[in-house]
Image (spheres, rainbow, N blue to C red):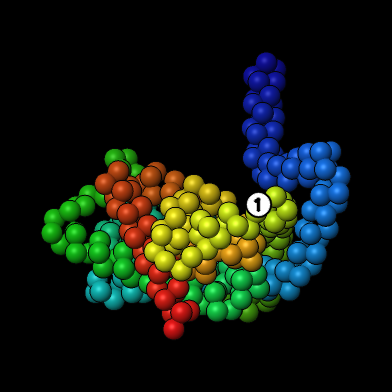
């Protein structure tokens, strides 16, 4: 009896911790709105109205984004990623970067997937290409970026993601050929996990998923999960954007990152590392900054650098790879992000 009570208590504690972890974004959003309303009722009402209007305007893109993510999960389209890691090193790097930038791989599958690739002997250069490109863009992110910042920016972000992956992959290939990074994985890291099965036993996608009840159920689960995920992060982002527009003078933004020179892009690249919340949450925030005078090149550098070095992506690298590989990852991310912002800014100026 005592053991049963102890087990039940531990289960309850674990469940409570899980609920807090999954709901903390909603809690933070509600807390910010409550404090704003108590201290400034007019701004509280304006922020709430701003969030509602922004969500309605983004709804068509959200719907398409959710459908894409659910369809990818239900059909098993993420298994196509396995094909990116076969062939010559030069071809592997290019394909890995493309799949990293275009695949709808969920964050929960990244760590075991990367561990499986490295443990099975896939060259670090190809893995690095996928690692760098994957956090920046995916089909649903592309749709939302186009809706919030415009199709031109979404295309630029996709090119930057794939370009960053190719650049990082080839740079890593050159270093490994000189004898560096012979053993990139930390001691004790294996190749288990759900994401690794796509590499060990790749299966063809089932595009007509609605013909199987199990896949229909998975589509519904993925759609619900993606909906909750997007809405909680976007709600927080729009609340922060409303407060930023209300209280952050546009002159400050224009002075820091509003120019067209290298300095503004460099500042945005560096600031993107600690300030980045989440790929979806960052979009409306950057949209507000652009409206206040942030240079487009700086905005792109912020999104790319922040995406690659965001907490989930950085933890994945730190947990699996040795510190030298982690340092290389960060260096490539910052260098490539800075270059992406400068190229985009120069292209707009032509």
Residue 276 falls left or right of residue 56: left
- The local crowd at label 1, few if under 14, some if 14 to 19, many if 20 or more residues have their Cα within 10 Å, is some
Comparing 183 with 25, the one in front is: 25
Q: Tag 1's secondary structure?
A: loop
Q: Position of residue 342 (x, y in %)?
A: 40, 69
Q: Residue at x 30, y 65 (%)?
A: 169
Q: Quadrant of the N terminus?
A: top right
Q: Position of residue 66 (x, y in %)?
A: 67, 67
Residue at horizontal 55 percent and vertical 74 percent from the top:
154
User: Eyeballing the image, is 277 above or below 199?
Assistant: above
Q: Nearer the viewer, residue 295 or 152?
A: 295
Task: Give the image quarter of residue 12.
Answer: top right
Mark yes or no: residue 5 visible.
yes
Q: Can you identify the residue that label 1 sits on?
A: 248
Q: Classify residue 32 as left or right of residue 193.
A: right
- The percent coordinates of residue 151 (x first, y second) are 59, 79
Q: Position of residue 139 (x, y in %)?
A: 56, 72
Where the C terminus falls, by quadrant? bottom left
In the figure, 228 relative to 138: above or below? above
**Quick one: which residue is furthest to the left in this view?**
178
Tell me if residue 70 can be seen. no
> In the depicted view, which residue is nearer to us: 318 or 189?
318
Q: How many marks?
A: 1
- The quarter holding residue 97 reads bottom left
- Residue furthest out toward the bottom: 350
> Which residue is painted at 40% across and 73% down in the image?
343
Q: Residue at x 37, y 67 (%)?
A: 339
């Amino acid at each position: 009896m005592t053991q049963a009570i102890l087990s039940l208590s531990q289960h309850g504690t674990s469940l409570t911790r899980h609920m807090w972890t999954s709901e903390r974004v909603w809690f933070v959003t509600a807390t910010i709105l409550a404090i704003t309303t108590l201290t400034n009722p007019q701004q509280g009402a304006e922020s709430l109205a701003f969030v509602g209007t922004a969500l309605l305007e983004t709804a068509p893109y959200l719907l398409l984004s959710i459908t894409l993510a659910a369809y990818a999960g239900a059909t098993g389209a993420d298994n196509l990623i396995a094909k990116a890691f076969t062939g010559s090193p030069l071809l592997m790097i290019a394909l890995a970067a493309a799949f990293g930038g275009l695949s709808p791989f969920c964050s929960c599958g990244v760590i075991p997937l990367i561990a499986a690739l490295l443990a099975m002997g896939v060259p670090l250069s190809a893995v690095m290409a996928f690692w760098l490109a994957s956090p920046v863009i995916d089909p649903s992110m592309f749709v939302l970026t186009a809706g919030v910042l415009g199709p031109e920016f979404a295309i630029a972000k996709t090119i930057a993601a794939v370009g960053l992956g190719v650049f990082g992959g080839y740079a890593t290939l050159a270093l490994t050929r000189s004898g560096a990074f012979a053993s990139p994985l930390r001691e004790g890291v294996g190749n288990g996990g759900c994401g690794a099965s796509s590499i060990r036993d790749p299966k063809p996608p089932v595009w007509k998923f609605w013909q199987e009840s199990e896949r229909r159920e998975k589509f519904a689960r993925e759609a619900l999960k993606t909906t909750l995920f997007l809405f909680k992060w976007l709600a927080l982002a729009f609340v922060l954007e409303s407060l930023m527009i209300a209280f952050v003078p546009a002159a400050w933004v224009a002075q820091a990152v509003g120019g067209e020179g290298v300095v503004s892009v460099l500042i945005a690249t560096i600031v993107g590392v600690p300030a980045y919340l989440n790929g979806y949450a960052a979009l409306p925030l950057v949209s507000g900054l652009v409206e206040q005078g942030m240079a487009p090149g700086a905005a792109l550098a912020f999104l790319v650098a922040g995406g690659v070095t965001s907490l989930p992506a950085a933890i994945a690298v730190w947990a699996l790879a040795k510190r030298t590989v982690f340092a290389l990852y960060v260096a490539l991310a910052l260098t490539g992000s800075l270059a992406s912002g400068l190229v985009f800014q120069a292209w707009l100026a032509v």
